[in-house]
Image: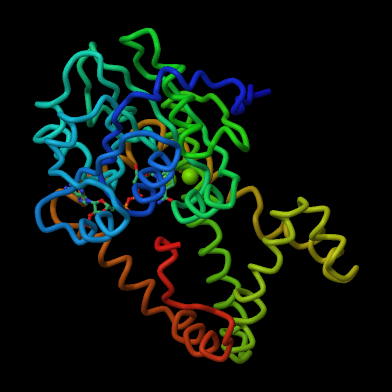
Amino acid sequence: MAKIFYDQDVNWEVIKDKTVAIIGYGSQGHAHALNLKESGLNVVVGLYNGSKSKAVAESKGLKVLPVGEATAAADIIMILIPDEKQADVYKNEIAPNLTAGKALAFAHGFNIHFQQIIPPADVDVFMVAPKGPGHLVRRTFTQGGGVPDVFAVYQDATGHAFELALAYARGIGGTRSGCIQTTFREETETDLFGEQAVLCGGVCSLIKNGFETLVAAGYQPEIAYFECFHEMKLIVDLMYEGGMAKMRKSISNTAEYGDYVSGPRVVAEPSRKAMEQVLKEIQDGTFANKFLTDNKVGWPNFYAMRKLNAEHQIEEVGGKLRGMMSWLKDGADLSKD
Ligand code: NDP
Ligand code: MG
Ligand code: MG
């Protein structure tokens, strides 16, 4: 079983006089920067010239510098820009300002694990990855709580990298609810697998297939939307709160019986085999290579797939039906929480 670390396990001394540069002010960036500042650390934000995020960060009283200058001014440099942009920004702006004894930090192991970024041996390298989106990292912190983190040390040049990572996690609120130690490899591979096979890829495919099956059988798309898409949240909320058992307590016996007899037929051995293949392609670097290559040539595949999915009938029907539900704040910018 994993060892879990809490506030009382943290040596705050190792971080309390440090300056932290948060590179990027998006989903994770805004949450880390504001939480660390309110935890008493000196925070600077690193952005590029013309960045839309600059004014937003400054409106919160944060000092914004070009990435190179932010790196030079800081002891800990946390890289929170999109994964596919990190290697170039690291090479051109961070590496030249990364002197011995500083710490390079990440919220996802991708670039270190797939060797897109190879840091010098004389810096600490750690990861603190919140297990939730940035707006939740921020909101829970302001309410006195925190989103659990996983953390890892890739390189310990100073002898303090482990303590530093845990202290950073405390600064963003992670150790209030608990931090689990992992490795860059484990975090990267499991994170990619989870989002591809289950959370994003798996769930969207399941919903679309259910919707298409009903529509092809002649049922109204609006009804198919409610049955296969809209109610997903209600079910997932129950599982999130109290496990599958709580969900099964809340649904009818008819639904629970159907769950047991039909679920394992729908997601069965072929899906398990496909999951194993997805995992293999994550482990051997095939996925990372495809993703980075598509990015290098301007995302032709990414944009084509995005367009195809956006034009799916389920999105059109869903947009119309969500308009009927006044309590849904579609388009609300959650990152501004
Ligand atoms: P975002 O896409 O939200 O980051 C966008 C930010 O990066 C914006 O402020 C943007 O500025 C800035 N930016 C873009 N390019 C540059 C550049 N060249 N130089 C400086 N700043 C730049 O990222 P996320 O928060 O989603 O992800 C950050 C990291 O956190 C990733 O490693 C990700 O895997 C990880 N992570 C993300 C989670 C999430 O909830 N999103 C959860 C856990 C980990 P502008 O807007 O002005 O262009
Ligand atoms: Mg994840
Ligand atoms: Mg991820």
In screen coordinates, is 258 left or right of 150?
right
**Relative to 11, residue 239 above or below:** below
Residue located 26% across and 67% down the image:
304
Residue located 44% across and 65% down the image:
334
The quarter in which the N terminus is drawn is top right
> x, y (%) of residue 124?
31, 17
61 and 171: which is toward the camera: 61
In screen coordinates, is 6 left or right of 72?
right
In screen coordinates, is 210 left or right of 32?
right
**Ligand 3 falls in quadrant:** top left
8 and 274: which is toward the camera: 8
**Relative to 263, residue 105 above or below:** above
Res 162 quadrant in image: top left
Residue located 61% across and 90% down the image:
218
In screen coordinates, is 104 left or right of 240?
left
Res 45 quadrant in image: top left
> x, y (%) of residue 212?
55, 78
**Relative to 327, residue 135 above or below:** above
The quarter in which the C terminus is drawn is bottom left
**Relative to 37, residue 316 above or below:** below
> x, y (%) of residue 85?
21, 45
